[in-house]
Image (cartoon, rainbow, N blue to C red):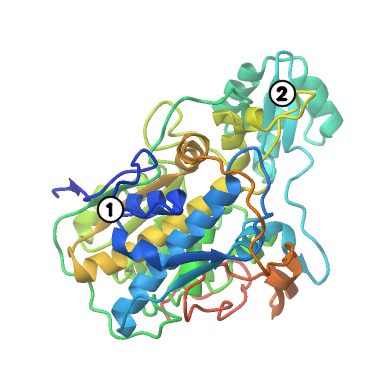
Amino acid sequence: MTDRPMPSEGGPADRPTADRPTADRPTADAWAALGGPAELLDRVGFRGPQDVLPSGLPVRRLARATVAACSLAAAELAAHRAGGPVPAVRVDEGAVATAFVSERHLAIDGRTPVSFAPHSGFWRTADGWVRTHANYPHHRDRLLAVLDLAPDAGPDQLAEALGKLPAEQVQERAYAVGALAVAVAPVSAAVHPLVERRETRSAPARPLGAAPVDRPAAGIRVLDLTRVIAGPVATRTLALLGADVLRIDSPRLPEAEDAHTDTGFGKRSTRLDLADPADRAVFEGLLDTADVVVTGYRPGSLDAHGLAPDALFARRPDLILAQVCAWGWTGPWAGRRGFDSLVQAGVGIAAHEAAPDGRPGVLPAQALDHGTGYLLAAAVLRALTDQRTDRPGGRHLRFSLAGTASWLLHGIEPEPKAAPRPGTEPYDPASRLTETDSAYGRLRHALPPIGYEGAPVDWARPPGRWGTDTPVWR
């Protein structure tokens, strides 16, 4: 297989030039990093409240740029499949802010899920602070065990044990046993790419017929091998736009069903054990006719199952493979487990947002997760268009939470406080929420933020029970 970088490959370091609009630089930078035609940027506008996602970092600008890029990519594909000009993109910043904390707005029969378990959070250590993530029981059990605590030890006992140890020692001991703890670090000077793109050898993509403007991804088959937030937000967005998204999980890995309820809209979900010959045969049949594969696991962790990029492209040179990880694709931390909260701690966001008393802070949303999710969905949509209008062949797309964090820290300029848009009401998330009946009960949930002329206003189906769908394409 011969690979070559995609034209215009780049990230936040690509500055706008005289022939690129500068009205909203983060949107222009994201669109350029995705290889989007610069002339389409004049289709993008924003509306709604501006008093959203307040932070010491430009979180609002990141959030609206990622959704705008995704909306424009959807509009571009819609124009290709429905005919006519690219629809105008109008992003509602209130809808963006609400969607970026969708997990906090979710209610299930009136019950609000808990985002973080008691053993997850910031803890003072002998020389600083550490951030733990113990939402999954196996991660909690490993963390307690490596600190020589009983399996039923509570948060107070955890705090006492951590207070006696240096932060980096906790971090490395946890890493060695598969637990999750990261020392709170100062702002990192490292710059990771926002997206890495390459195209594989030329191969004709499956022809697509006409599709309605509100379903530009209709007929696209997406194998969803992701968990938690970033990857599932991307595939939830592709499902919104009409793709047939089938999420596959191992029966050996537990899942938090509340998290699945938030990100499972529009998708179907099944469980297959890739080490079992019968399940593997089912998976191979699905892979043979998939258009897109999205993975959200650590680099190399799926290679043993024949899912290494080179193996996939040797088998399917027309495939779109989109991958997301926590810490980037190269370097000493590439193979480590990670979540948004841990990356915030490890790259210096938590230190940047610290309180006056020195306690580490957080962003107003898990913006690394959500922002990366919308960028990944945008990249897939752009690849679908590119394959059929410009350069046939496979596409390999790589994202990381660290890359999005680097963009936030180093690639987006803060903006002065703007005067409210004329006629704009103060931000109220209630108008961006709705209720839907589901297999889990009555759901209150955030509406999708994708905004272009003719865009869908809600998902076609609520989330089904995790892992219970038949593993077949629709």
Residue at image position (46%, 70%) is 89
Earlier in the chain: of badge 2 and badge 1, it is 1
Q: Nearer the viewer, residue 94 or 463?
A: 94
- How crowded pointer 2 is (Cα within 10 Å; few <14, some 14-19, many 20+) is rated as some
Q: In which quarter of the image is residue 290?
A: bottom left
Decide if residue 306 is in sight here: no
| Residue designated by label 1 | 19
| Above/below status of 24 relative to 246 | above
Q: Which of the two marks, 2 or 1, is nearer to us in this view?
A: 1
What amino acid does circle 2 point to?
Leu
In this rendering, position of residue 327 left or right of residue 330: right
Identify the image quadrant of the C terminus.
bottom left
Q: Residue 147 carries which label?
A: 2
> How many angstroms separate mark 2 from mark 1 (CA)?
57 Å
Q: Which mark is residue 461?
A: none
Element class at badge 2: loop
Decide if residue 141 is in sight here: yes
> Where does residue 181 sit, x and y in percent of width and height?
63, 30
| Above/below status of 125 relative to 93 | above
> Where does residue 396 sit, x and y in percent of width and height?
29, 52
Residue at image position (41%, 66%) is 72
> Where does residue 286 sit, x and y in percent of width and height?
36, 69
Residue at image position (55%, 50%) is 61
Q: Quadrant of residue 403?
A: top left
Q: Which of 136 and 447 is in front in this view?
A: 447
Tag count in the figure? 2
Element class at badge 1: loop
| Above/below status of 227 relative to 345 | below
> Where does residue 210 sit, x and y in percent of width and height?
31, 86
Q: Nearer the viewer, residue 33 or 305?
A: 33
What amino acid does circle 1 point to?
Asp
